[in-house]
Amino acid sequence: MSSDKESATTGSRFSGVTGVTLVDVVEWDGDDDPENPMNWSKGKRVYHIALVSIIVFVVNLSTTISAPASGIIMKNFHQHSPILGSLTISIFLLGFTLGPLLMAPLSELYGRLPVYHLSIATFVAFLLACGCSQNITSFLIFRFIAGCAGSSPSTIGGGTVADLIPVEKRGAAMAFTAVGFIFAPVIGPVAGGFIAQRLGWRWTFWIVSIAAGVWFVTALVFMRETYAPVILERKAARLRKSTGNTDLLVKGHERLSPLTHLGRGLSRPLKLLVLSPVVLLLSIYVAFIFGLMFLCFSTYSAVFIEQYHFAVGVSGLTYLGQGVGMILGLVLFGVLSDKILKARAKRNKGEMTPEERLPLMVYFTPIVPIGFFLYGWTAQEKVHWIAPIVGTSFIGLGNLFVMLPSQIYLVDAFGSEAAASALAANSILRSLFGTFLPLAAPHLYAKLGYGWGNSLFGFLALGFMPVPILFYKFGARLRSRFPVRL
């Protein structure tokens, strides 16, 4: 290759340290380089985001699709502990705690695509195994491993959006990918109640594994790598081979062994969680709200079967109350988020800060405690069944405006290269709360009843109301004062 052509493809030459040989930097061939995922056609970017949204939905469907059948599962395995019954649902989320620690760094070392492929293949295998389990021990182990593998789409999905969509249009795209993350846990029990009643509880796992298997085959054929550093590294490898220039490097990347890269990557989510007050405090808040959502999920069967005498299949429909609230929230978010960001950026001379994603969280946070008070006391007093369902719709609406803005905030704050690690850090605490907080439900409600039990969580949610306000006002200052070197 001629020196002119090589220069056009590799960009400038640099030396990081005096006395070190100059090396060529591999970059994009201009702002409109077709290899850059940001420059892919709109259709190609949309179907990649659609594929991510679909698998996020399918994986999260597995979190609660077996919830209405938890009593049947326990009876089948000759178990009677209410805590163990809650664990059959929540242990999947425990996998979501550990999985991101591996999935995020692997995606930032080897790219998004191989992580999607490997993790979903593993997810399908162990979900099938859940349906074939013959005892409670193997069931819980298989479900935990399925959760670890299935955590990848929710962990690196935000990174895929950051790879493909510019900041000013990212709100709508993130809302699209969040459809599965937010609605699948609500839709799962609706379908799962009828599946368990008519086909048996094992089919609640087999049907999800079939859907994930179809996605896996589709992704093998149509999905492409979107992570820019990995694409540039492949370009650099081609140029090293064609030019014989072994000094070619991707801009911003050091020459490290894969093991060293992986070691650094594994530490990134934990470093962000420990060293960044923004990530830590926001993750605690999100984890608390997420834990409350799953605590509600764990009570619906008991409330509507025992208090209102619903059948198992029909009891799954009660989850739709929370789903309706989330749908309303998603529509509002899709309409308002990017508009608010652009309007505030216009007032700030074009500057768009991640904190401008938080006003909607500030405005809608008070809805969560209102929902808990309404749900708890109407269920306690056995008011008509529609009243507690209306309460759960308030909880769903408030939850959405905590979960979604926080995810987009982290993606905007840490950019494409660290978005997966930031979301993984957030997922660790969120999944821990989602796993263990519901385990307290049986004893809590046995002592306090549904009225005061839910009021307790409502008061705690009220106590957290200043958190998004403080983040909006001081988030930028905290990020600049406590930078994390990854």
Image (spheres, rainbow, N blue to C red):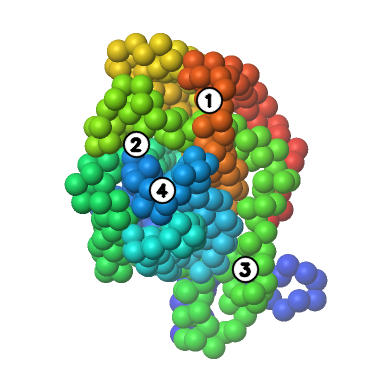
Say which residue label 1 marks: 446
Q: CA distance from mark 1 to mark 3?
A: 47 Å
Picture residue at 64% right of the left edge, 40% below the top: 279
Question: Which of label 3 and label 2 is nearer to you?
Answer: 2
Q: Earlier in the sequence, mark 1 or mark 2?
A: 2
| CB within 8 Å, label 4 to label 1 | no
User: On residue 186, which mark appears?
Assistant: 2
Amino acid at circle 1: Ala
Residue 278 coordinates in the image, percent (x, y):
66, 37
| Tag count | 4
Say which residue label 3 marks: 262
Position above or below: 327 against 103: above
Position above or below: 229 against 474: below
| CB within 8 Å, label 1 to label 3 | no
Mark 2: secondary structure = helix
Q: CA distance from mark 3 to mark 2?
A: 36 Å
Dot 1 surroundings within 10 Å: few (below 14), some, or many (20 or more)?
A: few
Q: CA distance from mark 3 to mark 4?
A: 40 Å
Say which residue label 4 marks: 74
As rendered, which of 3 and 362 lies closer to the eye? Answer: 362
Mark 4: secondary structure = helix
Question: Which of label 4 and label 2 is nearer to you?
Answer: 4
| CB within 8 Å, label 3 to label 4 | no
Residue 60 coordinates in the image, percent (x, y):
38, 47
